[in-house]
Image: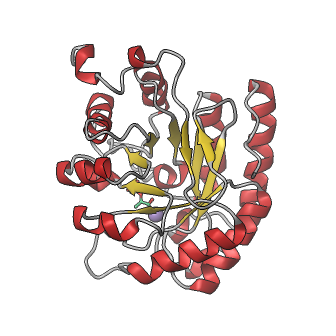
Amino acid sequence: MPAPDDALRRSGRAARPDGSVVAVGEDVPPVAFGGREVVLVAGPCAVESREQVERTARAVVAAGAALLRGGAFKGRTSPYAFPGLGAEGLDVLRDVGRALGVPVCSEVLDAEHVAAFRGKVDLLQVGARNMQNVSLLRACGRSGLPVLLKRGLAATVEEWLLAAEYVMSEGNERVILCERGIRTFEPSTRATLDLAGVVVARQRTHLPVIVDPSHAAGRRALVPALGRAALAAGADGLIVEVHPDPDRALSDGPQALTPEDFEGLVADCRAIGQALGRPVLARA
Ligand code: PEP
Ligand code: MN
């Protein structure tokens, strides 16, 4: 049962029938999500080294990404998996993003870490496993930084929008939603990409909605098709994992595109964008 529309006081479509545009970029030219142009975000799952981020960033930006992603603090399923470089990883992202003139996005795991992200990243990512972490949502709402809110692995569209409402209720209107696949009975993909949920979200809220085909697919061979389908379904952008040497990646290697694969996906996005009247945003 959908909650009454007044539960979506700030995020509901009625608050801004024409949709909202969220600007991302503090010390670099800002990138607009939710406008006519679709935005491509790309980069490694995890920041592994300065060299790895530099190589990846140069390649994805040259190919057409407007924003760089990379996890510095990784909340892995296993406590024994690579946990990320932590604060050092944020410095790497900031340096590489500024050198290339693109904003950067990284996941924040804890409310206490939010302050440390200021001045380092341009977009705070709240991960699927944290979508209903109310204290983290509130801290992001008070951060003054835009927030990329991933949909939880088992969250309804309603719960996802109410999580956005938590951020907004702290005075932060700059929220971008991200569908990244939900858990179903289907084992042939890592998660089931819910494109219907993207359409529903775009009808119910004015916030931009982007899609992460990488975590939904779990395997690189599926990523381009899911990315293309997402744009055709009306997504305002994509966030894609790319690694220069996926077989050696410290996390999510099987779903990482190579820089060459990513170039191919960008070409597809440009063709789809042209058909839809929504070109891929070129870097400022
Ligand atoms: C990620 O973006 O690397 C990530 C962990 O995503 P999610 O929270 O969607 O699993
Ligand atoms: Mn990942």
Residue 187 image position (x, y, % from top left): 39, 50
Q: On the rendered structure, is 108 left or right of 249? A: left
Picture quadrant of residue 28:
bottom right
Decide if residue 245 is in sight here. Answer: no
Q: Nearer the viewer, residue 258 or 71?
A: 71
Residue 164 lies left or right of residue 221; in this view the side is left
Question: Residue at left 73%, top 62%?
Answer: 61
Residue 168 screen position, x and y as percent:
32, 37
Color encoding of the figure: secondary structure
Ligand 1 is located in which of the four quadrants? Answer: bottom left
The answer to whether residue 62 is seen in the rendering is yes
187 left or right of 140 in image: right
Q: Nearer the viewer, residue 82 or 173?
A: 173
Rendered location of residue 196, percent (x, y): 46, 26
In which quadrant is the N terminus drawn? top left
- Identify the residue at horizontal 48%, vertical 25% (top origin): 202
Q: Is 245 rendered above or below residue 148?
A: below
Above or below, comparing residue 204 to residue 43 in the picture: above
Q: How many marks?
A: 0
Q: Where 200 sits versus 145, above or below?
A: above
Q: Quadrant for residue 11, please give it.
A: top left
The residue lying at 30 percent from left, 42 percent from top is 167
Q: Give coordinates of residue 136: x percent, y percent.
A: 24, 55
Identified at 31% across, 46% down, the residue is 152
